[in-house]
Amino acid sequence: MIVIALIGIVAVVAVPMLRAQDPVRLDAAATEVGNALRFAMREAQRTGGYLLVDVSTPGQLRVHASNASGAQLGAVNDPLTKSALDIGTSQPQWPNSIAMTGRFFSGGVAYTQLLVGPAGQLQAFEGGVNRGALQAGSGIELTAGTLSALVAISETTGRVALP
């Protein structure tokens, strides 16, 4: 009985502590996603090319070299790791506790891909089809339990804002 009581006490103390980690993980994920979006904006301007930010696979953000028609021409490398810029919420630092959804609005509809042009043009894409200019409220939504945050991207300036 004493062992069972001790396990119960430990559980009562540990569960709230584990839940307190959700905001920390959510903030870390938002920072990483924001950095990826900022990188895509700067890299398109630096290279004079197009980049496609693809969040069509649930929980996965990938950045691809592209052209004006939104074709995926190959992965873009992360300048720090020198490997493909690929952020997944199943990575060890976010053990399946965070959902990630692309919400790039055009015509009032949310799409899962964003085409970034060399002069800062921002177009919503999906399935290789240009859906039009980016609209307000666009970004990548992150959810951890009952908490959610939108890493927003301005439709006019391309500025990325963290929650």
Image: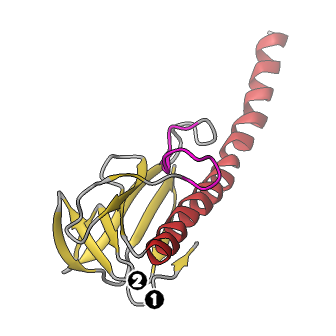
* Prevalent SS, magenta region: loop
- Say above or below: 141 vs 145: below
What segment is highlighted magenta in the picture? 78-91
- Of residues 2 and 123, the one nearer the viewer is 123
Amino acid at the residue labelled 1: Thr
List x then y, in percent, for residue 72.
28, 55
Q: Residue at x 47, y 47 (%)?
A: 86
Counting from the top left corner in percent of width and height, residue 122 is at 33, 79
Q: Quadrant of residue 119?
A: bottom left
What's the residue type where badge 2 is placed?
Gly
Question: Does 41 sit left or right of 80 as displayed?
Answer: left
Residue 82 colored magenta? yes
Instruction: Return the residue nearer the eye: 43 or 110.
Output: 43
**Nearer-the-camera pick, 47 or 128:** 47
The residue where tag 2 is placed is: 120
Disc 1: which residue: 157
Q: Quadrant of the N terminus?
A: top right
The reply to whether dot 1 and dot 2 touch (C-beta < 8 Å) is: yes
Q: Nearer the viewer, residue 137 or 31?
A: 31
